[in-house]
Amino acid sequence: MTKQQAYFKHSVVLLLVIVFAILFSPAHSQPSLPGIPSLAQQNPASNVGLGKPAVVQPGKSFQVVLQQGVQVGAVTSAYIYTVTYDSGLKVRNYTVTVTGGGNTLTVSIPTNAEPGLYDLVIRGTSTIKLLRSVWVYKTLPPKLRIVHFSDQHYGAGQPDVITGDMNRLAGYLVASLLNPDIVIDTGDIADTASADQYAQAVSYEYAFLYNYPIFAVPGNHDHPPDSFTKYYGDTYWYRLIGDKLLIVGLFSPEQGYPPMEQLQWASQVLEANKAVPIKVILVHHPVFYYQGELKTRYDDQNIISPYDPQKNPNSPVSSYWSVNMDAVKYFLKMIEDYRVNYVLSGHVHRDLFTKYTSTRTGSTTYFITITTMGMGSAIYDGLDYYTLDLNTGTLDFPVKPPTFIGFNNDSRKLAQNSIPVGIYPPTNNLGVSNQVFTPTFYLQSVDAYIFRVENSLPYLNLENTVVWCLPWTGDFNIKVLSALNGASVEVLDKMVLEGKLYIALHIKLPHTGKLEFALYKAPDTQPPAIKVKMLNPAKPATGATVNVFVEVSDPGWGVKNFTASYFLAGKEYKLTPELYTPNTLTSPATAFVYKLTIPPLENVGNLTIKMIAFDNAGNRAAGEYTLTYESPTPPPQPQQPTQQPPTQPQVPAPQETPQPSPPTPQPAPAPALPILPIIGAMLIAIAIILLLSLALRGRRKTS
C-alpha cells in the first residue's frame, strides 16, 4: 500500500468516525425547550405596547412615553421588525427615526414600511424592546373584523385553573382562526393582579396572537394596577384609526365605574375627535345590567334610576354604577352628545346586549357586555366576533350561535349571544352542565409542545393560516398524532430567530374535526416512569379510606394519560385518578402527581394496584404496587380489679396530640445513564486520538 493510499484510508476512517459521532450525539443533549412564559417581558413604555399599539401609517410618527425609571440615553439606532406570512415567512425590518429625549421620544415610520404589527427596538446607552407596539396600516378595509373577549382571569378557572388555562388558549385559537383585524379585551386580564399572571398573559398573547393588534383595558381584578402598568402600560388611553374610528379605553377599578376626572378626560377626547364618524368606548363594568332595548335619556329619573334589590329591582342601571348616579348621568349624556356608537364591557360573566336610543338626541348606542373567556360564567366561556362597516358604522355578527337573540328582550338576563369556547363542566344558571364546544389541551415538555383541539360547534367551520412565535432550541419537526373528520394541520414555513421559532401553520378544523399534533425538537422513545410517592395515612388500616399518590413522569413529550385499578379477591375495581399537581399548565411540566382514592375496605390484608401510563409519543408504561393494611389492634381484655394502697393523686403529664404521620416518599430508582451521549462522546474521543496519531505519523515521516 502506498503512502498516499494509507493516508487516504486513515482519512476515510477518521471521517466516518466523526460522522458517527455526530449522528450518535442525540438531540436529548440539546437544552430543554424554554417554555412559553419565557417570552414575557415588562413594557418599558407607558403609552404604547402589547395591549395598546401605536396606530400609524407609513411616513407618519407617534410618541413613546417611557415608564418611570426607564432610560435609553442618546439614541444611536432604532428599528421595527415582525415576521409575517406571504407565500412564505418573511422578516420585515425597517429602520425608524427617533427624536426627542428624556422620557418622551418621537418615532417616525419610513414611507416604505409594509402593513403589519411590529416590535419596536430602540438602542442608546441601553436597549429597550416594545412587544407588538406598532400597528402600521396603509388603508383600512371596508369592514373591520373584530374579536372581543373579556375576563380572562389568568391564575384562575372554573372548576379549576387548568380548565381556565385550556379555555384561554381555546379562545386564542378560535380568535386566530377567525382572522380578525383587531382584538379587543375589556379587562380582568389577571385574577389577583399579580405580576406572574400578567407575565403569563403577555407571553401567551405574544405566542398565539402574534399578528393581531390587541387593545385592552384593565378591570377591577387588575386593581391595584401596579403590575398591570408594568406589563401593559397606561390604564386609560385612546386610539384614532384613520379618520374612521375612535376607540377610547377607560379604567373602572374596584369601585365599579371610572372616576369623574377620567370621564371628563374622555369627554375632552370625544370633543377633539367629534368629526370621527364611528366612536367606541371600552370600559370593564357595564353601565346597564339589562338585556333588550331602552328608549330614554340620561336625565329620565323614571328609567335611569339607581338599582335597589328591594325598592327598585327592575332598574336597568347596573348595581356597580348605581352607587354614583352623577357618573351614570355624565356618561350617558356624553354618549348622547357625541353620538358614541358602541360601548363594550365585561365583568358580569354573561351576555347582556342593550340598545339605547336617546329620546333627546335621537342617537342610538349599542352596549355590548359579554361573558368571560376563562372563569365561572352564568352561561359558558366564550368570545364575540363582529364586522364593523367603516362607511356606515353598522356592526354585524357573522357567526351566530343558535341561541343568539341579539338585542331582543330577555328578563332572565341570560342571553347566549357569544361564541362558546373550550368546555364548561359546572352547572350554569340555565341548569346545563358538562358543555363541550372547542375542547383544547396543550402541554409544554422538555422536547415538545403538544396540542389537542376539537370543534363541536355545528355552525362554525374554522380554517386559517396562523403565525405562532414559540421559544425554541435545537431542531424542529412536526408530527400529526391524530387528524379526524376533515381536520388538518400543515407547516407552510418555519424559521428560528434569536431563540424563537416562527411557524406558519395552516389549520383546518371543521365541525366534528379533531386534531392532535406535536411540535418537537427530538423524538421520544422512552416510556413514562410510574412511581408511588406516598400514602395517606402512611400506615393504612382496614375500614379507612387510603389515598395513594402516584407520580407519572416523562421528560420527553410529556404524560398523556394515566389509568389505575385495584385487584382484590380476583376482582378488578377501577379507580378514577385525580390530578393533584401541577395546578396549572402555563409552565412546562414533565411530571404529574395523581391521587388514587381507595375506599374503606374491611378484613383485607393487602391488595394490588395496577397502573398504566402513556406519553404523548405513544410509549406505554405499566406498574404494580402492593398496598398492605395493618391488622386492627384487638381491644384489651377486662381483668379482675386488685386492691391497691391509696396514693396521692397525680397530675397527669401533658400528652401530645397524635399527628398523622406524613407520607414517606419512596426512594426513586437511580436514573439510567444517557447512553447515546456517552457513545457520542466516546466516538469523538476516538476521532481525536486518530487525528493525533495521523499527525504524529506524518511528523515522523517528515523528520
Image (spheres, helix red, strand yellow):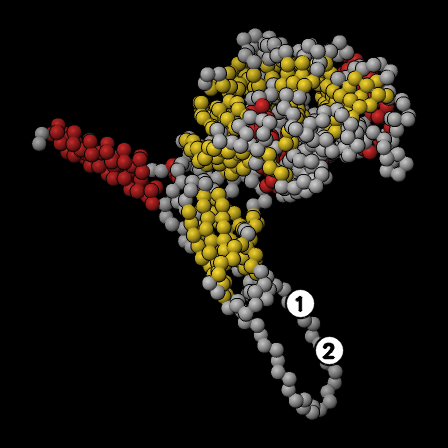
Q: Residues within 10 Å of mark 2 (few under 14, many from 20)?
A: few
The answer to which of 523 and 38 lies nearer the viewer is 523
Which badge, 2 or 1, comes first in the chain's sequence? 2
Among the 4 quarters of the image, the one containing residue 57: top right
Question: Label 2 to label 1, Cα distance in Å?
Answer: 18 Å
Is 554 placed above or below 3 here?
below
Q: Residues within 10 Å of mark 1 (few under 14, many from 20)?
A: few
Decide if residue 439 is in sight here. yes
Q: Give the residue pinned by disc 2.
A: 651
Quadrant housing the N terminus: top left
Residue 80 drawn at (x, y percent): 55, 17
Among the 4 quarters of the image, the one containing residue 18: top left
Asked which secondary structure carries label 1, the reply is: loop
Q: Residue at x 44, y 47 (%)?
A: 528
Is 663 placed above or below 122 here?
below
Asked which secondary structure carries label 2, the reply is: loop
> Furthest-left residue in view?
1
Do the residues bearing badges 2 and 1 touch, measured as CB atoms within 8 Å? no
Going by the numbered disc 1, the residue's amino acid type is: Thr
Decide if residue 219 is in sight here. no
Q: Residue at x 49, y 58 (%)?
A: 572
- Residue 538 falls left or right of residue 385: left
